[in-house]
Amino acid sequence: MIKFVMCITRHPDMSRAQFQEYWRHSHGPFFMRNAAAMNAKKYVQSHTLDSPLNEGLRTSRGMQPEYDGVAEVWFESEDALIQGMSSPEGRKLAAALQEDEGNFIDHTRSSAFIVEEHEL
């Protein structure tokens, strides 16, 4: 299995609560309705907590501000991901997902990458 990971910063015109509401109740269901067509096996949203612990972690390590959330999407393989996203339906869905992301994500301050998990 491989995983698509996206570390997300919310759109600058949104509060974190608005971002989380849209992501969870609009974008998430839209993604899930189309997950099989993209060969996605699992989708998880991790929503950042408004907690003083996050500030403490950041300042104690001299890190950048936390992301507003992390999206993870599992695929059987790189080939399965490529096949799912390169079919005519997959390309159409990818464009629609990216367009919807523009409603709540600041892509210029977010990051996405493909990983392989190693559970210890």
Image: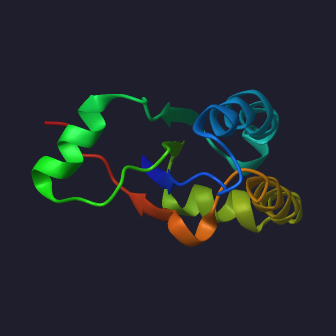
Q: How many marks?
A: 0
Left or right? Give the position of 58 relative to 29: left
Left or right? Give the position of 107 relative to 35: left
The x and y percentages for residue 23 are: 69, 37
Left or right? Give the position of 24 relative to 90: left
Q: Which sits in the foreground, 58 or 80?
A: 58
Q: Which sits in the foreground, 33 or 89?
A: 33
Residue at 63% x, 43% y: name it.
40
Q: Which sits in the foreground, 49 or 8?
A: 49
Q: Quadrant of the C terminus?
A: top left
The x and y percentages for residue 82 are: 63, 65
Left or right? Give the position of 36 relative to 95: left
Instruction: Establish if 60 lies above or below 90.
Output: above
Q: Residue furthest bottom?
A: 108
Instruction: Establish if 87 lies above or below 13.
Output: below
| Quadrant in the rendering for residue 119 | top left
The x and y percentages for residue 34 are: 80, 41
Residue at 37% x, 57% y: name it.
115
Q: What colour scheme was applied to this rendering of the protein?
A: rainbow
The x and y percentages for residue 108 are: 58, 72
Residue at 44% x, 61% y: name it.
114
